[in-house]
Amino acid sequence: MEDRRYYVPNDPDEALVMKAAGGETARYLAGGTLVNWGPVKDETSTLIDLRNVCGNKIRRGSTGFIVEAGVPLQQLADAEELPDIINRGADFVAARQIRNMATIGGNIAAMRNDSNLIPALLVLNADLRLYKAGKISVMNYTIAPEIYENDIILEVIIPESKGPGVMKKVTRSNNGYPVLIAAVTLKPEPIIVVNGALPAIIRLGRIEEALTADPELPKERIEKIVAEEIPVIADIHGSVEYKKYIAGVTVADLVAECRADDSAKGGRK
Amino acid sequence: MGIRSVRNSDDGYGFAGSDTVILDGVTANASLLVAGQLDGRDVKTVESLSPGKTLSAVQSAMVDAGIVQSGYNAPAAALIMTDLLNRRENPSREDVIDAFSGLFNRATGYQQFFLAVEIARERMKDPDFVPPEIAPEFREDLVHIGTPRPKVDGPKLVSGCPAFVEDMVRPGSLILKMLRSPHAHAVITSINTAAAEALQGVELVMTHLNTPDIWYSQAGQGFPEPSPYDRRLFGKKVLHVGDRVAAVVAASEEIADKALGLIEVEYDVLPHVMSLAEAAAEDAPIIHKAELTYEAGAPDDLDKTNKNADPVAGRIIYQFPIGAAPHRNIAASVSGGIGNVEEGFKDADVIIERTYASKQIQCTPLETHTVYTRMDGERLVIHASTQVPWHLRRITARVLGIPENKIRVIKERVGGGYGSKQDILLEEVCAWATWQTGKPVFFRFSREDEFLANSTRHVMEITVKIGAKNDGKFTAVKMDVNANTGPYGAHCLTVPMNGVGKSLPLFLCDNFDFNVTTYYSNIPPTGAYQGYGAPKGSYAMQMAVAELAAELSMDPLDLIELNRVHQGSMLEILRCLGEGREGTAVPAVSCGLGPALKEGAEMIDWGKKESSANPDVKIGKGVVIIQQGSGLPGLDHSGASIKMLGDGTFMLHSGGADLGTGLDTVSVKMAAEVLCVDMDKVAIISGDTDITPFDTGAYASSGTYFSGSASKKAAEDIRAKILNAAAEILGEPEEDLVIEAPGIVRGKKESLTYGKLAWHTQGGEGSGQLIGTASFTTEDAAFPYGAHFCQVAVNTRTGKVKVQKYYALQDCGTPINPELAMGQIYGGVLKSIGHSMYEEMIFDKKGRCINTDLRSYGVPMIGDLPEDFQVKLVYTDDPFGPYGAKSVSEVSVNGAAPVIANAIHDAVGIWIREWPFSPEAVLKGLGKI
């Protein structure tokens, strides 16, 4: 293994310069749970530690919550002021050690298919504040993350939720890789996002349209539309048949949960 | 930095948690950190908890609660528990589960962690706190036996002191790395190591071209082994993805890795076989078209068979016939039975015949396979993480072509073995490297190596046919076992046989029949794994009994009661089930099944149908009975010696190989009980081939029964010598003397302490140092039994099965260490829940395992614990076991698969006849997909 270079910039500008100088194998380092992860760490030549660049505070803004990118997942899980779905998304990371180390910014930037947080942020219509690009939606970020590869996520802006957001993780064993992560909200409009053993983080447009057209769409129809819509391949987590089936029933169950919660707490504690 | 207490169980995956440290006040995985991240930050390791010799409240609580078994990640657990109690003064069950959510513990099953937290919480307030009950106590007539006592190596392990092989590696030692086959079945047509050998820092490159043409078995079994000698250090043919191609010994890991990349290998890739059906097919590729040799009992047609041998395939040596026909991929076969099953089936009113199957699963020890070899003058020293020090010495001596007295094996603490460290998987390669270079060499399997090259549980397909009268009485039972041994035949006869031998004798029937056939294939190697075939046999037999009960419209518990073994039952079927020798019918001299079934049924409210508020969730209950053995009577052998030291304390040398189960504690308790001294008066060294007497090793559940008996017998030997010497000193007849606590010989006139006795005997005019020795062999068998009950909730929409209640009622005779016995059982049950529901090695079309990490493989963690998980120790007094003890280490893995499957049937009416019971399998069974 070649020697790695390790930098701790004091501000975003310095970090950007270091990233540019480091070339393709330079990586920003937040908590380290992904960059240093066994299967990938040898590819990295330059590590740029963002500890002095990204803060770790949560505060209330004018339209929602501002979560600095360096906030660890455990802090998110414990932050009672945040929407339930964010607490759950953070808590779905099974190991406390990882929750202590991993940060919200790092989790988003890594775009892993076992990220629970990204679906949660998507259904809440959350935004990001990047140092260079400024404010963009999480949705736009996830569509083309490579555009922002050299940029730095500074904050995550979570709007006041207008409806309950719910999510579920489907795994075989408690700490196993997710076959499926699904997040659903119905208000102000249906947003349904899935992640897990899929080709990418996917927003299910067909079922969203169907639920917009018919808010009382029966669960059997939801199951069928989701199963048809979701792109899956067979792998160690299950067959195509199973993945389509479980996606259908999981989304249908979450929609039912949303409907039941609709008049409850408005997605807030 | 030289801090060994931060362990590596998963090569930087951040899953196992053995690498846990406290970073700026919170737990973190050290292997996910690079040095730069630590700049200016506070890092605490376990060394921070007990700067002196005194254990912290948390550490002492862990030892007391019995959760320090293999101890490999005990330092990590201590840090996690400390962090928890610093955050939560009175942690809830959920808090404990959350705290340990990132710690993989294969040994103890987590359940006693809750107790440890309670003890630690109280001890942090009051350092002298003594918990009211750690575990139930047995044998009021005895002092140490049957009563919880701290594990003798507990403090050392929980403190993170050097204890494991990796801790013994000296600076400057060479590193060995293995080049593994990318093909499941191929012939190496050329191999060029010149560039690798030329690399600076490379000491040695090993291939089939420069290593001994010696054939051996990796199975650590008693000699002569019932396993074929069908491999050499490096073969010209590779037989599975991950098979050895070459090894590099170099000054550093980086150089070794670079050298591996410089080795040029060309292969002639052959068709491979993975499944039993493929291996048994008439036109199947043959894995071992080898020249066959028999040390005894060669078949008449051997010459004819050998005419078809392919020289590239090498040789196979058999110590005696094991029913092998390798030119048809048959590694071993055996048949047997009692009575007349055909007549029995004719007499039956109802007959069922079902086939049960299972996938390949891994042992996943926290400490991967590891060895360190070095020279001591002209002798080779092997620091090993092994269950079989003496078999390791014998096999290594054969491979190296040197006498056994040139080799010393030191068994270090073992960070989990579960059977896989009964096999010689890497030690002999490392030994050869040191023998060639004269230099110390360290070799450690990565976690991926474990999945590619560690021995696993045999894949089996078992067909059970049972005939019964309408009242449920069995008239005939037939079991056909087809097993897949993979590329090599280690344990190929005995593991599948044990599937029969530990499942049929649970029932009484005049007519039993069995057939076992084991096939070679190109799956990763198989071998010994806790339970040793019994979990598969138990799954098949217990499922078939439950299915028969359904066919007869009987309560399965009633059907079990009607046909089960009782205390005193003669187990005739064992006449046909000797391990490579003639079997013997023996009685079940102690059997706690009756009370176990009664208490378990009461605990789970057997017969009461439960329901869920969720209409998609159905609740069901199951019951099974299980058994194992206690070593191998007539085959196993254990030895021990004990000497009195100058102050009247004792040094016990036990041949037993404690692999974390607490065998050393068992041995010390035996000696302390016999000699009427506190346990701290008996120190122990075990499993060192230079120092301690011979022992066949820790397998087949032999530890307490064999090694414990040897220690007891050695203590009784020195006790007799103590009385003899004291009689002379005191001038009183021996029959007037008694030994009393704390180590006093009391006569009618005077008494003598052990300290004074030592002074007398070891003075120049004395009789000499008192030393007791013993070997233990026996033909008497002792069977541990158990009844397992469970309640599951099956979600019919998602296929998810939740184990709500699991009750393991286990008869291990007198539990020598009740808290450690319970830990063994909790660990075995959770492990087998994992096997039954989550774990599965998955292969691509080329035969490569594609889930080679713990997370994607699916090991159970604390979040997978049954909601209500209880172990009950059912006391019996076995007449043959030491102080009435029987084995406990393996039996508990035999229950989960059948009891969960039976409960699933009770819940939703489907029989799942293949492991694992994944949600997908359940949904298929329900016809949902």
Image: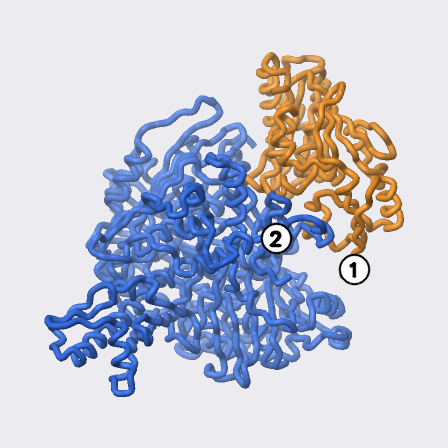
Chain colours: A orange, B blue
Three-letter amino acid code of the residue under disc 1 = Asp
Instruction: Tell me: B423 left or right of B753.
Output: right
Label 1 chain ID: A
Residue under the image location 79 percent in, 35 percent down: A153
SS assignment at label 1: loop
- Rendered location of residue B648, percent (x, y): 29, 72
Q: Which residue is mark 1?
A: A3
Three-letter amino acid code of the residue under disc 2 = Thr
- Rendered location of residue B335, percent (x, y): 36, 61
Task: Please determine if labels 1 and 2 lie on a single subunit.
Answer: no
- Rendered location of residue B691, percent (x, y): 41, 76
- Rendered location of residue B320, percent (x, y): 41, 74
Asked if residue B439 is positioned above or below residue B159 in the image, the reply reads below
SS assignment at label 2: loop
Instruction: Tell me: B681 left or right of B94.
Output: left
Residue at the extreme bottom:
B765
Q: Is residue B401 visible?
A: yes
Query: Across the whole image, how many numbered discs are drawn on residues?
Result: 2
Q: Give the class, few, some or many, for how many residues have Cα within 10 Å of label 1's Cα (few <14, many ≥20).
A: few
The Cα–Cα distance between marks 1 and 2, rounded to whole angstroms, is: 27 Å
Residue under the image location 30 percent in, 51 percent down: B785
Q: Which mark is residue B852?
A: 2
Residue under the image location 80 percent in, 55 percent down: A5
Q: Which mark is residue B497?
A: none
Tell which of B861 and B125 is nearer to you.
Answer: B125
